[in-house]
Amino acid sequence: MLFNLRSSILLLFLLLSLITAIGQDNASWSSFRGNASLSGTSSVTISKTPKLLWTFKTADAIKSSPIIMQGSTYIGCNDGNLYCISELGKLKWKYNVGNAIEAPPLFLDNKIYVGSLEGGLFAIDAGNGKLVWTYTTDGQIAGAANYVVKGKNTNIIVGSYDYSLHSINALTGKGAWKYTSENYINGAAANNGKVAIFGGC
């Protein structure tokens, strides 16, 4: 759970039962609402008596939702940084994208994909925090990126305030296609591998 208190992140880590591994298991939450279809469901059993384990302070407000993968928490901040925080609440790395991050990040194939309010989509190595590639839209990105797998290809799909839903090759960062709507695309696009569904302003 996340409490947005101006310049601090207060992460309340819940003691979860039935969790013994750190990999891609029930303890992981790799994207906004958990998966590509945005179902928002999990089979995790949460303790009835959660306890605060740690807090972590940033330089500005938090509007981004966190994701948790392989024991690390990833979260964007209005200070322009994407943070990677260990399960003990210690900074592992941070990467500054140059503008506020309100969109929740996406973890996929050991990379973090996150958009900025300047319209950039960034692919960052989840292990070391190094930039892999950048893709630029013509408007801010406020909603989470998602992914779709078609055969051997994986594309990242993300909406922008340039009125378009963009599809980008996950490996190269090259644009595959874009669909232009009639207004801002502010949220995440759900998909089932065949059809993407999203709302506009």
Image (cartoon, helix red, strand yellow):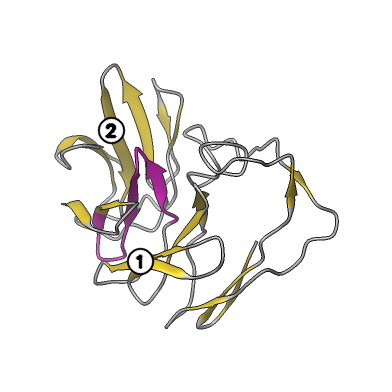
Who's the residue at 46% across and 24% down the image? Answer: 192
Q: Whole-percent x and y of residue 34? A: 54, 41
Instruction: Tell me the tag on residue 155.
Output: 2
Q: Is residue 137 visible?
A: no
Instruction: Check the image and report above or below for 177 versus 98.
Output: above
Residue 107 among those drawn in magenta: yes
Q: CA distance from mark 2 to mark 1?
A: 26 Å
What residue do we see at 49% from left, 55% from top? 72
Provide the residue designation for mark 1: 93
The disc labelled 1 sits on which kind of residue?
Trp
Q: Which mark is residue 161?
A: none
Q: Nearer the viewer, residue 82 or 87?
A: 87
Q: Which numbered disc, 2 or 1, marks the residue closer to the eye? A: 1
Name the residue at the front extreme.
Answer: 20
- Is residue 178 in the magenta section? no
Identify the residue shown where x is 36% and y is 29%. 148
Q: Is residue 93 left or right of residue 71?
A: left
Rendered position, 53 above or below 72: below
Local secondary structure at mark 1: strand
The magenta segment? 104-121
Within-10-Å neighbours for mark 1: few <14, some 14–19, many 20+: some
- Pointer 2 and pointer 1: residues touching (CB < 8 Å)? no
Left or right: where 57 falls relative to 125: right
Task: Note whether residue 191 is visible.
Answer: yes
Rendered image quadrant of residue 83: bottom left
The crowding category of the residue bearing disc 2, from other C-alpha atoms within 10 Å (few below 14, some 14 to 19, many at least 20), is many
x then y, percent, for residue 104: 45, 55
Q: Quadrant of the N terminus?
A: bottom right
